[in-house]
């Protein structure tokens, strides 16, 4: 019979209770705990499944197998394995563990006595290899087989509000355009979310990543820790909202006797699926009995399509009839995501865009901001629109403060501290920033005191440096330095910034500079940004400022090593 005990002495497994972080320190912590083990009932034997040793008295003894499976499929695999054990001479233990965590433990060389791994997506095998390479280790030996099950990625919507979306198309294009409110469980641990981001990326112009980056920033504003948390949020949302999830997750939620029910809606512009490959771990073939037992288990899984569809899964090719509330009986086409490298690239971009930051925004309010931009708007009007759009996309965990600058702004100083750095989760703080942005036209005047302000801003962020966050200065200007009094020269500024970094190299504060309009001194801005590990951007037309802001913010956390 299958062994489904949490006794660590029987078969020790690492317990993963934190999201995967791609660092050696985090992985070392991950590798040190106990285990999550599935405990479930045993079905009757499946007579047609292969049995190692042919049943009977098992003269050669019973073969012990260990399977690690993604939590979403571990329960049904446990049932199938129990029936397989009853029909033959194996004892199979199924351990439920997040695929991202398993990948981290394998990559770090953690002791994982597994014969088989069934992750929710082959991307986690690629993630394992990538982490192993970054740690200077050899990749774990695995053999990736074809999927034993799959589940399409859908929009999960409250059944009672399914007709409330009006003219909004339930499509990836609508998510990209911010027309469809959507929630995305953390793709660092959710294969359905990562596959959903891949589908979203496929509907963007690959020559211009900014719309996709903007969509990820918006989705990252609130990141549910799990599909269940996302489902709870869509029911509580004031406006009709969907959660990006797998069809199987919808089936499982509806089957838990929840009063609230979900419907799984296929995006009108197509979708993809999450696959569950059968992965052999280590040199299973070296042990003939074990190899035969693993092959028999694989046959049992592939021969248990009815059991899998009862649990809400399609087969490995996307076929099968799922008879459950809220889902289509027969799936629409949903190819599996095969490009692991592309998915890892998206995961890295997600990490960059959603990493929590402390930003000091430094805004040029010199008199030139009164000059016309386009469509009858002034430069300051264009900035107001772009700024509020950018702030609205930030997570509440982002900390933001605001300075204004122009020559002689604050007595002898060219800058004014108007909003302190504080979390955007504080609604009063966010309202204060909004009110300030609206008041900017009344605050214009003077020249551009660029150099003194830049140095003071970097100093201020270093004084309150938070090593757990990305600390940066975001400076927006339409001109060049016009402080011809006793202010810093460009050469002095660069030397002083380098000295700050030399005094304490642990407090790196990149300066991200955005210029817009024809008067911007991009040469000086580029030198300043480069000296801090930042970057300089130019919106050639003021109306391009919004897209340039997104581009700059999307790379704020990878400086100075952005690709």
Image: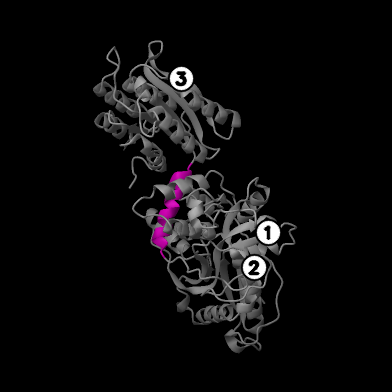
Q: Secondary structure at mark 3?
A: helix
Q: Secondary structure at mark 1?
A: helix
- Quadrant of the image occupied by residue 371: top left
Q: How far apart are the alpha carbons under marks 2 and 3? A: 63 Å
User: x%, y% of residue 299?
Assistant: 55, 81
Q: Quadrant of the N terminus?
A: bottom right
Name the residue that disc number 2 marks: 75
Name the residue that disc number 1 marks: 159
What is the magenta range? 339-355
Name the residue that disc number 3 marks: 442
Choose mark 1 or mark 2, whichever is in front.
Answer: 1
Residue 469 visible somewhere in the drawing: no
Q: How far apart are the alpha carbons under marks 3 and 1? A: 49 Å
* Disc nearer the start of the sequence (2/3): 2
Examine the structure image and report whether residue 220 is included in the region drawn in magenta: no
Q: Secondary structure at mark 2?
A: helix
Choose mark 2 or mark 3, whichever is in front.
Answer: 3
Examine the structure image and report whether residue 348 is included in the region drawn in magenta: yes
* Disc nearer the start of the sequence (1/2): 2
Q: Residues within 10 Å of mark 2 (few under 14, many from 20)?
A: many
Choose mark 3 or mark 1, whichever is in front.
Answer: 3
Q: Residues within 10 Å of mark 3 (few under 14, many from 20)?
A: few
Q: Does the magenta stretch mainly form a helix, a strand or a loop?
A: helix
Q: How is the image coloured?
A: one colour
Looking at this rendering, what residue extends furthest in the top direction?
411
User: x%, y% of residue 149?
Assistant: 55, 72
User: x%, y% of residue 530?
Assistant: 29, 34
Residue 178 visible somewhere in the drawing: yes
């Amino acid at each position: 019979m299958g062994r489904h005990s949490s006794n660590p002495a029987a078969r020790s497994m690492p317990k993963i209770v934190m999201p995967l972080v791609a660092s050696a320190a985090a992985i070392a912590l991950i590798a040190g705990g106990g285990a999550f083990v599935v405990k479930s009932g045993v079905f009757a034997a499946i007579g047609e499944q292969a049995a190692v040793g042919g049943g009977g008295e098992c003269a050669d003894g019973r073969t012990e197998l260990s399977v690690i499976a993604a939590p979403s499929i571990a329960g049904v695999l446990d049932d199938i394995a129990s029936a397989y054990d009853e029909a033959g001479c194996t004892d199979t233990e199924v351990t439920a563990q997040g695929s991202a965590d398993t990948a981290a433990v394998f990559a770090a060389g953690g002791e994982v006595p597994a014969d088989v791994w069934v992750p929710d997506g082959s991307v986690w095998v690629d993630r394992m290899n990538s982490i192993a390479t970054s740690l200077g280790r050899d990749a774990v030996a695995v053999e990736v087989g074809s999927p034993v099950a799959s589940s399409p990625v859908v929009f999960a919507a409250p059944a009672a509000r399914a007709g409330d979306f009006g003219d909004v198309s339930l499509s990836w294009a609508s998510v990209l355009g911010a027309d469809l409110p959507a929630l995305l469980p953390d793709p660092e641990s959710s294969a359905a979310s990562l596959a959903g981001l891949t589908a979203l990326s496929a509907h963007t112009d690959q020559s211009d990543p900014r719309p996709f980056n903007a969509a990820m920033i918006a989705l990252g504003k609130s990141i549910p820790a799990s599909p269940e948390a996302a489902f709870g949020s869509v029911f509580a949302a004031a406006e009709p909202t969907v959660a990006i999830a797998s069809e199987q997750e919808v089936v499982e939620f509806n089957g838990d006797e929840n009063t609230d029910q979900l419907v799984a809606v296929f995006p009108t512009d197509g979708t993809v699926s999450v696959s569950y490959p059968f992965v052999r771990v280590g040199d299973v073939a070296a042990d003939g009995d074990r190899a035969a037992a693993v092959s028999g288990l694989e046959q049992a899984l592939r021969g248990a399509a009815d059991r899998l569809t009862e649990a809400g899964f399609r087969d490995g090719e996307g076929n099968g009839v799922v008879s459950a509330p809220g889902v289509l009986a027969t799936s629409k086409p949903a190819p599996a995501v095969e490009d692991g490298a592309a998915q890892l690239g998206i995961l890295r971009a997600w990490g960059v865009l959603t990493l929590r930051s402390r930003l000091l925004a430094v805004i040029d309010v010199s008199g030139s901001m009164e000059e016309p931009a386009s469509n009858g708007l002034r430069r300051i009007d264009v900035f107001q629109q772009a700024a509020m759009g950018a702030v609205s996309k930030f997570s509440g965990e982002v900390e933001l403060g605001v300075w204004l600058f122009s020559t002689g702004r604050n007595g002898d100083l060219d800058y004014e501290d108007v909003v302190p750095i504080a979390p955007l989760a504080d609604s009063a703080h966010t309202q204060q920033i909004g009110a300030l942005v609206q008041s900017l036209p009344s605050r214009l005047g003077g020249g551009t005191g660029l150099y003194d302000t830049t140095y003071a801003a970097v100093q201020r962020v270093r004084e309150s440096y938070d090593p757990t966050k990305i600390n940066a200065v975001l400076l927006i200007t339409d001109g060049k330095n016009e402080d011809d009094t006793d202010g810093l020269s460009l050469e002095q500024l660069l030397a002083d910034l380098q000295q700050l970094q030399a005094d304490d190299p642990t407090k790196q504060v990149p300066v991200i500079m955005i210029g817009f309009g024809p008067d911007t001194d991009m040469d000086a801005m580029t030198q300043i940004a480069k000296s801090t590990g930042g970057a300089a951007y130019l919106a050639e037309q003021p109306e391009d400022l919004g897209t340039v802001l997104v581009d700059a913010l999307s790379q704020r956390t990878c400086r100075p090593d952005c690709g």
